Amino acid sequence: MVSTTTKPDKKLINEHFLKSKFPKKRQHYKLDNFFCFQGDTGKIIDWNQSRDILVTEDFIIGLIEGLEQEIGSASSVVMYNIGAEWGKRDAKFFSQWFKEEFGYEKGINQHILPYVLEAWWWPFTAQGWGNWDIDLSDQKNGFLFINIFDSAVARTLGDVGKPVCHIYAGLFAGFFSSLIKKELDCIEIQCYAMGETYCKFLLGKKETINAATFWQNEGATAKDIQTQLQNGEYLK
């Protein structure tokens, strides 16, 4: 399920019937609440005043395999860059939406980070991008881990023996870079498409991600990488 953000305006606000009727409603992440299906116009408008497009698994397979056929291994870089641009644009949209949705005068940087991040990801869950769990315990060391359960990409491609969720990695890099106003990179160090039960991402500075990439290429597992980073080995 893909969402295309549009500029909030009066017309779009009125298009979501439930939000127009209950503007203060907060428990709106059920399918019938979050989406407004308009049979007469063919539009699907979500609670965040964005127009959504329903896609099949064949669309995802076609996109990934089409890119690989055209540009080979560089397809992963393209998907990452798509995600990064998406994340940057979504951060801008979210910063404004967060204040309007909850009636806050303060910006997102003035609120507790876990609360802000859950508010950001909940719509993605509703749109079919999967549940998440974010580990902020290593934030003081300059990196953090994000787990994605039921990744739309990995679930579709199945066990192919390699990380495939490059668009997620780019999304996290773009969003968090915009959030803290510092350039961050992201890498998937564990993937459902590798036979794991969930996907795991590492977000951090370029040198951190470079170290993790090297270890991963040398055969290190996600647990190995996490242990080495927490021991400060990437600083050597």
Image (cartoon, rainbow, N blue to C red):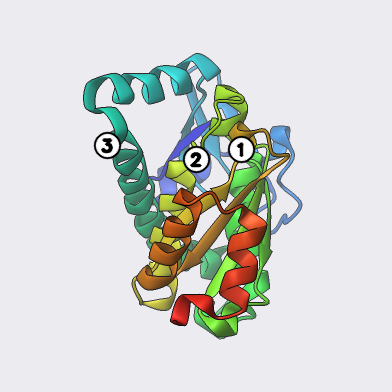
Q: Secondary structure at mark 3?
A: helix
Q: Is residue 208 above or below residue 216?
A: below
Check contact, mark 3 vs mark 2: CB within 8 A.
no
Q: Is residue 126 above or below residue 101?
A: above
Looking at the image, is 5 positioned above or below residue 162? below
**Label annotation for residue 151:** 1
* Relative to 39, 84 lies left or right: left
The label nearer to you, 3 versus 2, is 3
150 lies above or below 179: above
Left or right side of 9 for 138: right
| Residue 69 place in picture, x, y as percent | 28, 19
Which residue does the numbered mark 2 point to in the structure image?
165
Residue 189, x across and y down, in percent: 55, 51
The answer to which image quadrant residue 185 occupies is: bottom left
| Local secondary structure at mark 1 | loop
Of the pair 111 and 79, the residue shown nearer to us:
79
Q: Which mark is residue 124?
A: none
Give the amino acid at mark 1. Answer: Ser
**Which of the numbered marks, if any, corresponds to residue 74?**
3
Q: What is the spatial separation of the Cα atoms under label 3 and label 1, in whole angstroms?
A: 21 Å
**Position of residue 221 measured from the top left corner of the image (x, y, whole percent):** 61, 52
Q: Position of residue 157 (x, y in %)?
A: 55, 23
